[in-house]
């Protein structure tokens, strides 16, 4: 078959994409316009054609997987050590914190999700030749308009009544599909997932746990981090660990967790991941008060606000725990950690690792740029002296 594209080209495009927050189409298009990017990807001569089809990056991400992309993060840390951004000793002290990586989904409401489930059931029935008694395309359209109007006008009794009627219509279609596929095992497998999701949406209550917030991303969880501007976020929890060094900080691990675990239960995995990526076991870890109750025993964990068992040096270092917050902000606003567009939980893991690796490379570039300015300034000063 057709030979695969060079690995250096693919890795370079993925890193450049996350360094500059670009889509698959834009990073390939801008690669043709930028000779520096082409040299970074291993080309010696200027190229005038697209290196790959943009859709190839999607397949390459799935082909690499989180395990191989984790090696990119390890290589970025080694580059930071080799260029003098930090020393190996500084990797022994890390700051650990968690944040939410939102998923690229619409804000979930019961009526929106039920309408999407109804549309999927109708399309599947039409595709496989099932004659439904009624599809309610026009009826649900008018019903949704009424529900939105009632809720906007704060007419909650009317809205509640119309939502109940809307659920009845979706339930009719669900039961009709179940009757039509009762004697066909092949169709039962085709309809199994959407029927299960529809039944969950029809029967769930406000107090239930592990709710469904998206039909195409069922792993999404509702996470509350206590933010005033955004009470709830829908995505996955990401644990980040960064070096404690003043000035330039390097990400030493980036883990995405499913099912919204307690912060204290993620600390042990975060420290083990940091040791695996950097090759150096953390000695001191600085965390916030959300990590109380952790079970880490092979590392000194200092919690924000801690009074007992700390020296003057540790107390001074503990005040810098919140230095990780602006770095998380840059990862979200300047990178792709603020919105994950990759599919499923594997996509969350890949996105978090690529964001961390690209951020480390940007930090290395900032450091080298500062050294270059110092050298140029010294040369200019020498010329003026003579």
Image (spheres, grey):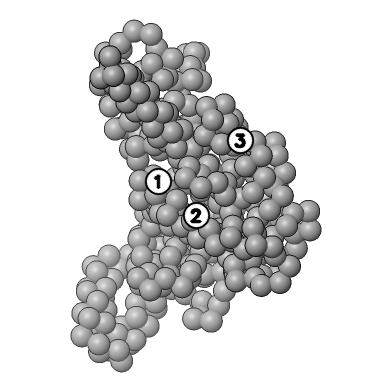
Q: Residues within 10 Å of mark 2 (few under 14, many from 20)?
A: many
Q: Going by the picture, which residue comes out furthest to the bottom? A: 157
331 or 142: nearer the viewer: 331
Q: In this view, does 33 lie to the left or right of 77?
A: left
Q: Answer above or below: position of 207 versus 216.
A: below
Position of residue 363 measured from the top left corner of the image (x, y, whole percent): 44, 37
In this orientation, does residue 258 appear? no
Q: Mark 3 points at which residue?
A: 87
> Mark 2 or mark 1: which is in front?
2
| Residue at horizontal 65 percent and vertical 36 percent from the top | 88
> Mark 3 or mark 2: which is in front?
3
Q: Residues within 10 Å of mark 1 (few under 14, many from 20)?
A: many
Mark 2 → mark 1, Cα distance in angstroms: 17 Å
Position of residue 124 measured from the top left corner of the image (x, y, whole percent): 41, 53
Q: Is residue 270 left or right of residue 296?
A: left
Q: Answer above or below: position of 33 versus 113.
A: above
| Residue at horizontal 39 percent and vertical 49 percent from the top | 330
**Of helix, strand and loop, which one carries label 3?**
loop
Q: Answer above or below: position of 209 versus 346.
A: below
Position of residue 70 measured from the top left corner of the image (x, y, whole percent): 59, 37
Q: Quadrant of the C terminus?
A: top left
Mark 3 → mark 2, Cα distance in angstroms: 19 Å
> Mark 1 or mark 3: which is in front?
3
Q: Is residue 145 left or right of residue 202?
A: left
**Of helix, strand and loop, which one carries label 1?**
loop
Q: Name the residue under label 1.
A: 336
Q: Tag 2 or tag 3, which sits nearer the N-term?
A: 3
| Residue at horizontal 30 percent and vertical 11 percent from the top | 46
In this orientation, does residue 353 appear? yes
Mark 1 → mark 3, Cα distance in angstroms: 28 Å
Q: Mark 2 points at which residue?
A: 324
Q: Going by the picture, which residue comes out furthest to the front? A: 386
């Amino acid at each position: 078959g057709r030979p695969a594209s060079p690995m250096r080209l693919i890795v370079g495009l993925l890193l450049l994409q996350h360094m500059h927050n670009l889509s698959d189409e834009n990073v390939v298009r801008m690669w043709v316009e930028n000779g520096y990017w082409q040299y970074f990807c291993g080309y010696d001569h200027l190229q005038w054609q697209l290196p790959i089809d943009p859709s190839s990056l999607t397949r390459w991400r799935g082909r690499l997987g989180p395990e191989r992309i984790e090696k990119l993060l390890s290589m970025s840390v080694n580059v930071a050590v080799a260029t003098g951004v930090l020393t190996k000793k500084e990797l022994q002290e890390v700051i650990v914190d968690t944040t939410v990586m939102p998923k690229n989904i619409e804000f979930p409401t019961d009526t929106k999700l039920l309408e999407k489930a109804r549309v999927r059931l109708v399309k599947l029935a039409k595709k496989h030749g099932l004659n439904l008694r009624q599809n309610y395309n026009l009826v649900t359209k008018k019903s949704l308009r009424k529900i939105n109007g009632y809720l906007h006008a704060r007419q909650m009794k009317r809205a509640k009544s119309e939502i109940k009627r809307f659920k009845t219509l979706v339930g009719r279609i669900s039961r009709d599909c179940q009757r039509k596929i009762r004697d066909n095992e092949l169709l039962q497998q085709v309809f199994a997932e959407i029927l299960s999701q529809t039944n969950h949406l029809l029967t769930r209550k406000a107090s239930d746990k592990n709710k469904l917030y998206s039909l195409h991303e069922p792993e999404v969880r509702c996470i509350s981090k206590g933010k005033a501007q955004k009470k709830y976020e829908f995505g996955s929890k990401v644990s980040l660990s960064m070096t404690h060094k003043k000035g330039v900080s390097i990400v030493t691990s980036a883990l995405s967790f499913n099912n919204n675990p307690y912060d204290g239960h993620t600390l042990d995995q975060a420290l083990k991941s940091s040791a695996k990526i950097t090759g150096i076991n953390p000695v001191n870890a600085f965390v916030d008060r959300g990590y109380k109750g952790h079970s880490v025993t092979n590392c000194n964990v200092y919690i924000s606000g801690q009074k007992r068992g700390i020296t003057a040096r540790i107390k001074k270092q503990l005040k810098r725990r919140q230095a990780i917050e602006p770095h998380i902000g840059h990862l979200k606003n300047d990178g792709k950690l603020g919105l994950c567009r990759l599919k499923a939980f594997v996509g969350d893991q890949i996105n978090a690792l690529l964001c961390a690796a690209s951020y480390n490379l940007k930090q290395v570039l900032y450091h080298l740029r500062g050294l270059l300015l110092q050298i140029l300034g010294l040369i200019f000063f020498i010329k003026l002296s003579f």
